[in-house]
């Protein structure tokens, strides 16, 4: 576990709802008296945490100038793992690798849902980009329903480099793309595999796509053009799971 600072009423409410026992300290704006902030402060008091009344300038520094809405808390969250730790984990595997790679997925609800599905299918971890991507937050933990503690999350600075290294370890890189010719159901997927999903709006970046061994899509019978990224990841992860356990 690592300790991080959260700020803003919504983020603190999520922490209170999902993991109140992990909140260690709190600071509130000594000049604000609004009802929402008072309610959050009362909830912290009920946990035995006495928010420290603080000058707004200090809160501004703690929140790195972002909108903190008068409250900052220190909370324990599952630790993010490094690229070196990913390499150690892959090299230590005694079974075919099974990873989900999220290329700049920013919505914490999508990351939480992906974690929950990754846990259900027995994936060995989720690989995230460091920039322009969601990290582990109370909202992610809440949506993941415990999977943030069971599925390792690896944060990497250079995804293309990591994909090249995974290929060197004989792990196939499968990218999800709506324009792919083959569907997920056309492929034999019982080999070491990393599934790459792109961001909610534009999909995988061009360089990420170049490092995929093959692309697949989910067949669509309706009028919408694409699925939510966590729903699409769920469909694909479960097809891999089905094939791995067939018979």
Image (tube, rainbow, N blue to C red):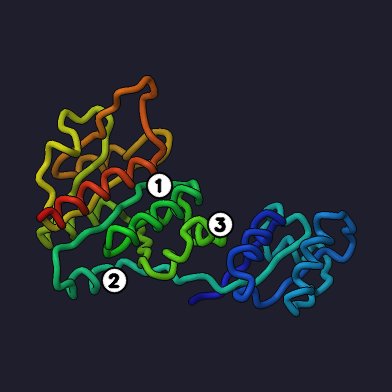
* Residue, disc 2: 84
Residue 122 position, x and y percent, is 27, 62
Q: Nearer the viewer, mark 2 or mark 3?
A: 3
Within 10 angstroms of label 3, few (less than 14), some, or many (20 or more) residues? many
Helix, strand or loop for disc 2: helix
- Foreground residue, 105 or 18? 18
Q: Earlier in the sequence, mark 1 or mark 3?
A: 1
Q: Earlier in the sequence, mark 2 or mark 1?
A: 2
Q: Say which residue appears at 62% left-offset and 67% top-offset.
A: 5
Relative to 231, residue 7 above or below: below
Residue at disc 1, secondary structure? loop
Evaluate if marks 2 and 1 touch, with contact meaning CB atoms under 8 Å apart. Answer: no
Q: Is residue 222 above or below residue 96?
A: above
User: What residue lies at 56% left-to-right and 57% top-to-bottom?
Assistant: 139
Residue 143, given in percent of the width and then of the height, sits at 50, 55
Q: Is residue 13 left or right of residue 133?
A: right
The quarter of the rendered structure image containing the C terminus is: bottom left
Q: Nearer the viewer, residue 52 or 19?
A: 19
In space, the residues marked 2 and 3 are separated at their CA atoms by 27 Å
Separation of disc 1 and disc 3 at Cα? 17 Å
Taking 168 as reference, is 129 left or right?
right
* Contact between labelled residues 3 and 2, with CB atoms less than 8 Å apart: no
In the rendered image, the vertical position of residue 124 relative to residue 67, given as above or below: below
- Left or right, 31 with respect to 106, comes to right
- Residue topped by disc 3: 139
Is 62 situated above or below 241?
Answer: below
**What residue is rendered at 26% in x and 51% in y?**
160
Neighbourhood count class around disc 2 (C-alpha, 10 Å): few under 14, some 14–19, many 20 upward: few
Q: Residue at label 1?
A: 104
Please tell me whether mark 3 sits on a helix, a strand or a loop. helix
Number of labels in the image equals: 3
Q: Which is closer to the viewer, label 1 or label 3?
A: 3
């Amino acid at each position: 576990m690592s300790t991080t600072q959260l700020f803003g009423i919504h983020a603190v409410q999520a922490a209170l709802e999902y993991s109140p026992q992990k909140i260690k300290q709190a600071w509130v704006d000594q000049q604000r008296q609004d009802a929402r902030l008072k309610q959050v402060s009362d909830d912290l008091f009920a946990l035995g945490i006495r928010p420290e009344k603080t000058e707004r300038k200090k809160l501004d520094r703690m929140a790195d100038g972002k909108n903190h809405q008068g409250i900052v808390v220190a909370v324990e969250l599952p630790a993010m793992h490094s690229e070196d730790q990913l390499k150690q984990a892959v090299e230590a595997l005694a079974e075919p690798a099974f990873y989900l790679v999220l290329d700049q997925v920013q919505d914490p609800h999508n990351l939480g849902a992906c974690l929950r599905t990754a846990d259900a299918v027995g994936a060995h971890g989720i690989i995230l980009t460091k920039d322009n991507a969601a990290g582990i937050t109370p909202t992610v933990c809440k949506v993941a329903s415990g999977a943030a503690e069971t599925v390792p999350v690896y944060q990497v600075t250079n995804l293309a480099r990591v994909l090249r290294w995974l290929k060197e370890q004989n792990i196939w890189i499968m990218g999800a793309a709506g324009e792919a010719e083959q569907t997920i159901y056309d492929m034999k997927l019982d080999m070491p595999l990393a599934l790459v999903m792109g961001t909610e709006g534009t999909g995988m970046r061009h360089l990420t796509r170049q490092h995929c061994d093959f692309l697949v899509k989910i067949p669509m019978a309706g009028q919408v053009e694409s699925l939510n990224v966590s729903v699409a990841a769920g469909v694909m992860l479960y097809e891999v799971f089905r094939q791995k356990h067939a018979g």
